[in-house]
Image (spheres, grey):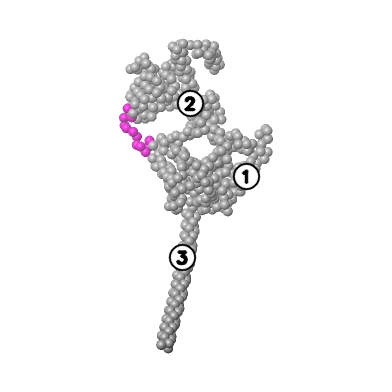
């Protein structure tokens, strides 16, 4: 054992002396490339020994050994975790080394007789340093899927051919195939070796199904996997239902439908699917129909320093995820799930444990659901069951956990409410919203709800208003009609009076004329009489 360590230390010291870090800068182009090839050849020898050791660790940590397995005796859950802790490599790299190590390790039969490795050609080329770890893993992985159905002779020929192509002993000798080129050839061989055709789709699908969470990168955690068709269909229908911009619009008023037409959706379809999945997860965790953890519903524990939360700088940490989360995400989760204060001294001892802040109760949630109907933001069709309850006035600012201070928001609009420009306020227990300035330059507050019962109430109220307006209009019409009748009567009366006055005037003129005529006749008669008397 000491000799192995001494030999490795000596090789490392020789490499450090012969190849200091700044040597490549002084090399010519050809010499640089030759050096890269020589170092890679040395690295393949090292990888071969790494693989052998990893395979032995995996063998001694077999599950069937129970508590006697090496990983358990060293306090690790699996051989992968044990190798990670010893070597500081990633879990993926540990699994890759163990896969190749187990496939190239010599075996022992139940009778005690030695058996060749599952992939003897890979093992031989790997041990001499002619085959790299990435190429060896490709061959083992691609051909391994056909081992149970392939003809043994054909399987051996395929492995030999792939190794020859990789080490430059095949048809293209002395040119060596790269790892990517070997991958293409290995998949072609795998298709050829599966002579019986693909296994039944259902059996293969059941074995290959799975969902994987990758490592964090750029603030995101990669997710991949394969779903059974019926599960994918259900998930797709959920996505379709909640990505439709006009879902659940049967109770919308004409004004609200007009609002939907002008709402600008800034999220991509992939982002909307992410937010729908977030709502599905929250709804499932809140349902109480899933196994508990520590006697409570599945709950993510988020830790953040009070000073960072108050200053708005720093980061929070979610249990189970290595990547820190932003304070914005922490505030979002605090608003939804409450907060519990824990006071520690400088040594880390717990001095005080506060009680959890009270969250909205199921009874309050039902009442708020009846009032709001779903996410309050116009154009959002996420139903109430998928929504979170947002404190309009935050708890940190004295906002109570009361129905007069809680509104329904979907995951996305709750997460972005502080930056999206949407305003929310309560007026006598009724929520009102104000669109962003780029949607409504006037910035008017308006009441909003998608609750069918509340919309029905609003319809009735509008109908009553319309009825009252019609009654008022009819009353005004009746008043105007009466006024018109009176005006016409007054006009007729004035006309009659004028007519009578005109008639009287006419009669007076006639009487005057008559009198004048009579007087004239009298005067003429008197004149004739006077003339006769004079004669």
Residue that carries the numbered disc 3 in the rendered image: 477
Quadrant where the image shows the C terminus: bottom left
146 shown above or below 339? above
> Any mark on residue 366, and which?
none
* Percent x, y of residue 395: 61, 45
Disc 1 residue crowd, few under 14, some 14–19, many 20+, Cα 10 Å: few
Say what secondary structure mark 1 lies in.
helix
Q: How busy is the neighbourhood of tag 2: few (under 14 within 10 Å), some, or many (20 plus)? A: few
Per the image, label 3 sits on a secondary structure element best described as helix
Measuring 34% from the left and 36% from the top, which residue is drawn there? 200
The residue depicted at 46 percent of the width and 34 percent of the height is 223
Give coordinates of residue 150: x percent, y percent.
34, 28
530, above or below 509, in the image: below
Question: Viewer-proximal residue, 492 or 130?
Answer: 492
Q: Which residue is mark 2?
A: 93
Q: Say which residue appears at 46% left-offset and 42% top-offset.
A: 264
Between 231 and 205, the one lying in front of the other is: 231
């Amino acid at each position: 054992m000491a000799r192995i360590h001494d030999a490795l230390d000596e090789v490392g010291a020789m490499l450090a002396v012969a190849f200091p870090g700044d040597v490549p800068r002084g090399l010519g182009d050809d010499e640089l490339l030759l050096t890269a090839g020589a170092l890679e050849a040395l690295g393949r020898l090292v990888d071969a020994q790494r693989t052998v050791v990893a395979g032995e660790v995996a063998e001694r940590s077999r599950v069937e050994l129970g508590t006697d397995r090496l990983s358990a005796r060293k306090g690790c859950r699996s051989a992968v975790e044990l190798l990670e802790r010893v070597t500081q490599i990633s879990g993926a790299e540990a699994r890759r080394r163990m896969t190749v190590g187990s496939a190239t390790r010599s075996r022992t039969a139940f009778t005690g007789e030695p058996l060749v490795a599952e992939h003897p050609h890979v093992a031989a080329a790997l041990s001499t340093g002619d085959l790299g770890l990435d190429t060896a893993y490709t061959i083992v992985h691609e051909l391994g899927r056909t081992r149970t159905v392939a003809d043994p002779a054909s399987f051996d020929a395929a492995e030999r051919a792939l190794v020859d192509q990789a080490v430059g002993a095949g048809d293209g000798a002395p040119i060596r195939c790269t790892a990517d080129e070997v991958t293409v050839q290995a998949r072609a061989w795998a298709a050829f070796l599966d002579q019986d055709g693909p296994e039944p789709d259902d059996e293969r699908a059941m074995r290959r199904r799975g969902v994987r969470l990758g490592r964090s990168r750029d603030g995101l955690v990669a997710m991949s996997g394969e779903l059974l068709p019926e599960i994918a269909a259900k998930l797709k229908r959920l996505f379709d239902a909640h990505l439709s911009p006009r879902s659940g619009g049967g109770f919308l008023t004409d004004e609200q439908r007009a609002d939907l037409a002008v709402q600008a959706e800034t999220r991509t379809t992939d982002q909307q699917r992410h937010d729908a999945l977030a709502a599905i997860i929250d709804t499932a965790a809140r349902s109480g129909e899933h196994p508990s953890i520590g006697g409570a519903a599945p709950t993510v524990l988020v830790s953040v320093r009070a000073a960072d939360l108050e200053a708005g700088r720093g980061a929070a940490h979610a249990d189970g995820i290595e990547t820190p989360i932003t304070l914005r995400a922490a505030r979002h989760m605090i608003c939804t799930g409450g907060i519990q204060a824990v006071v520690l001294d400088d040594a880390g001892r717990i001095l005080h444990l506060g009680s959890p802040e009270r969250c909205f109760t199921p009874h309050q949630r039902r009442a708020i659901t009846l009032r709001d109907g779903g996410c309050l933001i116009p154009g959002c069709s996420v139903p109430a069951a998928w929504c979170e309850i947002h404190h309009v006035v935050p708890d940190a600012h004295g906002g109570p956990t009361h129905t007069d201070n809680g509104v329904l928001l979907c995951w996305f609009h709750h997460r972005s409410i502080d930056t999206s420009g949407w305003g929310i306020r309560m007026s006598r227990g009724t929520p009102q919203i104000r669109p962003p300035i780029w949607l409504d330059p006037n910035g008017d507050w308006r009441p909003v709800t998608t609750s069918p019962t509340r919309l029905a109430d609003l319809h009735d109220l509008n109908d009553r208003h319309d009825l009252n307006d019609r009654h008022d209009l009819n009353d005004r019409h009746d008043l105007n009609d009466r006024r018109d009748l009176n005006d016409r009567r007054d006009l007729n009366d004035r006309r009659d009076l004028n007519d009578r006055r005109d008639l009287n005037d006419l009669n007076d003129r006639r009487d005057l004329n008559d009198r004048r005529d009579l007087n004239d006749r009298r005067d003429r008669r008197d004149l004739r009489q006077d003339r006769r008397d004079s004669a």
